[in-house]
Amino acid sequence: MKVQDLRQKSDDELNQEVLDLKKEAFNLRFQRASGQLENTARVRQVRRDIARIKTVLHERRASA
């Protein structure tokens, strides 16, 4: 996920993306706890994607 792509989306789309990623992070935590997680790098990637989106949203609110 690139910041340039995120900047082209609306606030509603970004908020929906955050919700989807949070659900995915929740599921990944359960998979890790039960020993079923195969792609451990995905946990870190999801966390960073959430942070990227929140940063873009914060920048928009600060500039408004």
Image (cartoon, grey):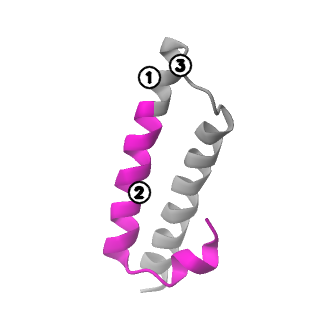
Quarter where residue 51 is shown:
bottom right
Residue type highlighted by circle 1? Phe
Q: Nearer the viewer, mark 1 or mark 3?
A: 3
Secondary-structure class at tag 1: helix
Q: Secondary structure at mark 3?
A: loop
Quick check: 59 above or below 26?
below
Q: Nearer the viewer, residue 43 or 59?
A: 43
Point out the tag, 1 or 3, that comes first from the N-terminus. Answer: 1
Viewer-proximal residue, 58 or 44? 44
The amino acid marked with disc number 2 is: Val
Residue at 36%, 76% in the rendered image: 11
**Quadrant holding the N terminus:** bottom right
Q: Main secondary structure of the magenta part?
A: helix
Residue 10 magenta: yes
Q: Are marks 1 and 3 in contact (CB under 8 Å)?
A: no
Q: Which residue is mark 1?
A: 30
The residue located at (41%, 34%) in the rendering is: 26
Residue 30 on the magenta span: no
Q: Is residue 9 left or right of residue 48?
A: left
Q: Is residue 37 above or below residue 51?
A: above
Residue type at tag 3 = Gln
Compare marks 2 and 1 and give the one earlier in the sequence: 2
Disc number placed over residue 36 in the picture, else none: 3
- Kindly identify which residue carries mark 2: 18
Q: Which callout, 3 or 2, points at the residue further toward the start of the chain? A: 2
CA distance separating discs 2 and 1: 19 Å
How far across and how far down the image is residue 25, in percent?
47, 38
Magenta region, residue range: 1-27
